[in-house]
Amino acid sequence: MATRIVTYQGLDQTLLALFPEFTEEYKSKFDYWVDWDKPPGIYLVFGFVVFPYLISLFDARQDEKLIRRLFAFFEDLASSKDRNVLDLLYLELIHKLLYAPDHLRKAWPYMGEKTKDLTKKAAKVLRVQMDVGT
């Protein structure tokens, strides 16, 4: 899969277009939202939809194809030159996985090289021991 150029602007719409599987969860989590001229930001979407959905996929041991697509997308994010995109990935995926070692072990085989590198760097900065079973 060719690396997709990812920028912060419009990332929430890009995510939902690439992953229609999130549509129902998105609508459910943000059913209280009143100002759709200013939809929930990407941090909220990652925090309330993407990460919990990913964890549920790991816990249920289902839909490996979707997990692979998600991690290919995360690798695109990790390859971005946009600092805001990298910050999002660090805070809403990598940081959370580092503090959930069982899920990090499950995620590790799906991660691309750039995502793994960012995860290792974050672990070093945060002084978190990584046990990914390799």
Image (spheres, grey):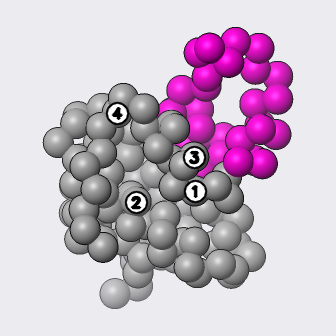
Residue 121 in which image quadrant: bottom left
Q: What residue is drawn where x is 68% and y is 59%?
A: 21
Residue ID for mark 4: 8
133 horizontally vs 20: left or right: left
Which residue is drawn at the image coordinates 77% and 38% (left, top)? 27
Mark 4 and mark 3 residues within 8 Å of each other at the beta carbon: no
Is residue 12 shown in magenta? no
Residues under numbered marks 4 and 1 in contact, where contact means CB atoms less than 8 Å apart:
no
Q: Give the CA separation, mark 4 to mark 1.
A: 17 Å
Q: Kindly state the secondary structure of the residue where label 2 is placed.
A: helix
* Residue nearer the viewer, 25 or 92: 25
Residue name at image x 67 percent, y 70 percent: 57
Disc 1 or 2, which lies upstream in sequence? 1
Q: Which residues are magenta?
A: 23-50
User: Residue 19, labelled with which disc?
Assistant: 1
Q: How far is mark 1 from mark 2, CA to CA? A: 10 Å
The disc at residue 73 is 2
Identified by mark 2, the residue type is: Phe
The image shows residue 108, relative to residue 90, as above or below, that is below
Label 3's element? helix
126 or 119, nearer to the observer: 119
Which amino acid, by three-letter code, is at mark 1? Answer: Phe
